[in-house]
């Protein structure tokens, strides 16, 4: 019979090992969500963008590129959240990578 250490379920696993590395490097997650409004209308929210960036300029560039309306909303729990009208999840993902605001693993798209 095989050794007890060879069994997969007995090996050491630290579920927080990757998150500790991300917290030390300062690479937080950027969450992109869609909230349903009345009827077919929806709002896209972006939270978790680094605090040292100028959110007003980012929102202005997103509004111009996506041809939509947008605003910065102050949330008690999450800090400042960007709200854009319409389903802009894929556009925001491409924008954040294209402008090098976030890396590939930082953006989390919710709702797909």
Image (cartoon, rainbow, N blue to C red):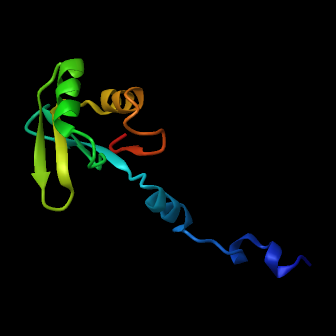
For the C terminus, the image quarter is top left
Depicted 80 relative to depicted 6: above or below: above
Depicted 33 relative to depicted 18: above or below: above
In this view of the protein, which residue sits in the foreground, 75 or 34? 75
91 horizontally vs 44: left or right: right
Q: Residue at x 51, y 68 (%)?
A: 16
Residue 7 visible to the viewer: yes
In this view of the protein, which residue sits in the foreground, 16 or 40? 16
Residue 70, percent across and down? 13, 32
Q: Residue at x 46, y 39 (%)?
A: 103
Q: Residue at x 29, y 45 (%)?
A: 49
Depicted 74 relative to depicted 62: above or below: below
Residue 43, percent across and down? 16, 37
70 horizontally vs 111: left or right: left
Residue 47, percent across and down? 26, 48
Furthest toward the front, the residue is 52
Furthest toward the left, the residue is 38
Q: Residue at x 48, y 44 (%)?
A: 105
Depicted 1 relative to depicted 79: above or below: below
For the N terminus, the image quarter is bottom right
């Amino acid at each position: 019979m095989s050794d007890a250490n060879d069994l997969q379920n007995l090996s050491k696993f630290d579920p927080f090992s990757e998150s500790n590395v991300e917290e030390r490097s300062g690479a937080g997650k950027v969450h992109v969500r869609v909230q349903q409004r009345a009827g077919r209308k929806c709002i896209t929210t972006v939270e978790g963008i680094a605090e040292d960036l100028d959110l007003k300029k980012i929102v202005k560039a997103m509004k111009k590129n996506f041809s939509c309306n947008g605003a910065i909303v102050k949330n008690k729990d999450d800090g400042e959240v960007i709200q854009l009208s319409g389903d802009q999840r894929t556009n925001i993902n491409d924008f954040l990578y294209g402008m090098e605001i976030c890396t590939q693993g930082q953006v989390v798209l919710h709702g797909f």
